[in-house]
Image (tube, grey):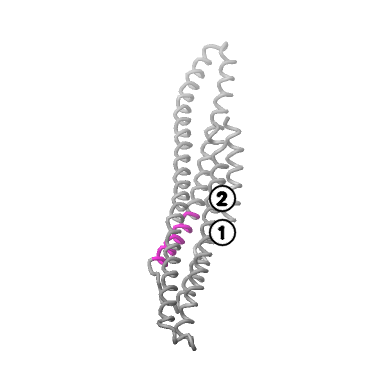
Amino acid sequence: MEDLNSFPTLILNTLENSIKHWNYVQSQSWKVISQIQNIAAKMVHLRKGALGKLKNFDNIGEKVGQKLAGNLEDAILKLKKSLPRFKTIVKEFKELEKELGEFEATVLSMLEKSNRIGEECIKIYYGILNNLLVNGEIFKEFVEFCQLLAEFTIQTEEYHNVSKLIDELSVHASEIVHMYENELLVKETICDDLPSPLSVLSTYLWIIWMTEPYIETGRIEEIKEEMRDISEKVLRLSAKIY
């Protein structure tokens, strides 16, 4: 089955691509936040600083303040425009989680079908056994059937093992999705609160937005390594089945 062989690798590749996509959008947002911080700092200094002889120019401080305020508004708007991109990536994560669930359901369906075949095999087994008691000539046929039954039993067990491994992949994927969903919620909350007072803007954006407290990169690397191990096991098991 080609899907069973390729699916775990596809899942890992998609996961890593989505993480790279998120990191790229995050790095782009850093540049915007830097602009916001620079503008905010200039506005604070403008309010506190002395204009000296420039105060003789008509409303120069007010005009500069208006221009900076406009630039700040544009930068904040640009930051807010990054949210749909973050949302798209979270959707990618959730779609991955959904595909894992669907794939597990497919494997379980195979297991169920295999179990039904097994029940029929048992009926045939007893039929052959009864015939064997009165007809010694079918002994060879009986032996061949027992061999097939043994292979079927192993295959059914392998389906069950694959299902358990896919379930582990789903649990890991859900953990990662939860991280990025929480982080998206943090970013949405920050954008909803903007513009904050300039005195707290720096701490608010730099520490919370930039740090991404809900994304545990160390744990993600552990999960990815565990998922690689599980994928290798799935591939080995699928080779036995087909």
Q: Amino acid at mark 1?
A: Arg
Q: Residue 188 at what x, y percent from top left?
A: 41, 63
> Which residue is under mark 2?
16
Residue located at (56% from left, 60% from top): 217
Q: Is residue 148 left or right of residue 62?
A: right
Dot label at residue 90: none
- How many numbered marks appear? 2
Give the vertical position of 234 relative to 183 (above or below): above
Q: Residue 194 at what x, y percent from top left?
A: 40, 69
Is 149 in front, or is 49?
A: 49
Whole-Å distance between the Cαs marked 1 and 2? 14 Å
Of tags 1 and 2, the one toward the viewer is 2
User: Crowding near pointer 1: few (<14 within 10 Å), some, many (20+)?
Assistant: few
Which residues make up the magenta segment?
A: 176-191
Dot label at residue 219: 1
Q: Residue 113 at what x, y percent from top left?
A: 45, 30
The numbered mark, 1 or 2, whose residue comes first in the sequence reads: 2
Instruction: Assign a secondary structure to mark 2.
Output: helix
Instruction: Assign a secondary structure to mark 1.
Output: helix
Is 150 in front, or is 8?
A: 8
Q: Is residue 186 magenta?
A: yes
Q: Main secondary structure of the magenta part?
A: helix
* Quadrant into which the N terminus falls: top right
Is 64 in front, or is 178?
A: 64
* Quadrant into which the C terminus falls: top right
Q: Is residue 179 magenta?
A: yes
Residue located at (60% from left, 33% from top): 240
User: Furthest-front residue in view?
Assistant: 57
Q: Amino acid at mark 2?
A: Glu
Give the vertical position of 237 relative to 75 (above or below): above
Q: Is residue 119 left or right of residue 135?
A: left
Residue located at (54% from left, 36% from top): 4
